[in-house]
Amino acid sequence: MIHKVEEYVESIFNNDSTGHDWFHIQRVRRLALHIGEKEKANLLMVEIIALLHDVLDDKITANIDKAKEEIAALLTELPLTKLHIDEILYTIENIGFKGGNGVVLDSLEGKIVQDADRLDALGAIGAARTFMYSGAKGQAMYDPQIEARSSMTYEQYRGEKSTAINHFYEKLFLLQDTLQTEEAKKIASERYEFMQKFVDQFMKEWNEI
Ligand code: ADP
Ligand code: NI
């Protein structure tokens, strides 16, 4: 039954090189189901929200209203109540770190997918995605003129020119404190340590000789 949702999402993400690929969706889906089991969440809701979580991002979809209609039509074919469908639409509209505009999701399933999405921005994969994204946007991997502004939040200087390394400070190192489930916090700590080592080593090599 979930196959139709899967096909719809796969067709949207098939050709993306900004870190928003179908494999990202698959990783978030697996992580979310894993956390969902620990949290005894509604796993059908978790899986659908995970599959759809990036579709309503304006970086990916030009016509958001049309996409919402398509998704609502797809969901009516699944064994979901109107309440469930409304909750899915609300959640996927508000799930992004910045797209959320500070909205705190109150459903357990929304929190779980948000945590899973944030976990995929951490660790080795998170670092790799950041360099892919920076490359796609024409940003440098590092620029000594663009300081690592760790005292500011991502919101304060989004839109300003940044670098891949700076993105660790403006977002990645801040994500750990926003996680809401115990299992995600557990998984995050190893990823966080790895990123710190990575940035330390990067700076060591940059300044070595
Ligand atoms: P998602 O919606 O999947 O959480 P985003 O759209 O925020 O992800 O970003 C996709 C990937 O690109 C993430 O891994 C993120 O850290 C990275 N990214 C986002 N913005 C920037 C940026 N300004 N510079 C470098 N990497 C970025
Ligand atoms: Ni995502």
Image: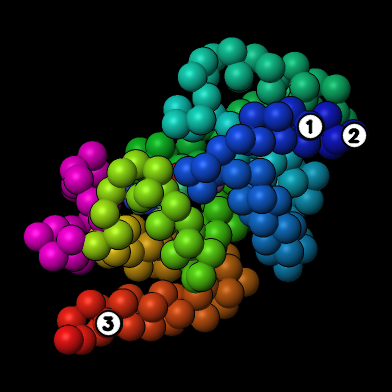
Precedes in sequence: disc 3 or disc 1: 1
**Residue at the spot of label 3:** 205
Residue 7 - label: 1
Asked if residue 122 lies left or right of residue 10, the reply is: left
Q: Position of residue 123 (x, y in %)?
A: 49, 70
Q: Tell me which amino acid carries mark 1.
A: Glu
The residue under the point 27% across, 82% down is: 205
Whether the residues at callouts 3 and 1 have beta carbons within 8 Å, the answer is no
Q: Tell me which amino acid carries mark 2.
A: Met
> Nearer the observer, disc 3 or disc 1?
3
Q: Position of residue 25 (x, y in %)?
A: 65, 47
Q: Tell me which amino acid carries mark 3.
A: Glu
Q: Is residue 158 covered in magenta?
A: yes
Q: Is residue 195 visible?
A: yes
Residue 188 - label: none
Q: CA distance from mark 3 to mark 2?
A: 51 Å
Query: Label 3's element?
Result: helix
**Residue at the spot of label 2:** 1
> Nearer the observer, disc 2 or disc 1?
1
In the rendered structure, which segment of residues is drawn in magenta? 143-163
Please name whichever residue, 151 or 163, is drawn nearer the observer in this view of the structure: 163
The residue under the point 55% across, 53% down is: 117
Q: Position of residue 101 (x, y in %)?
A: 35, 38
The residue under the point 38% across, 78% down is: 198
Q: Quadrant of residue 150?
A: bottom left
Instruction: Reply above or below: 14 against 129.
Output: above
From the image, give the main secondary structure of the stretch colored magenta: loop
Instruction: Pick out the residue farthest to the front.
Output: 209
Instruction: Reply above or below: 73 against 148.
Output: above
Q: Is residue 125 covered in magenta?
A: no
Whether the residues at callouts 3 and 2 have beta carbons within 8 Å, the answer is no
Q: CA distance from mark 2 to mark 1?
A: 11 Å
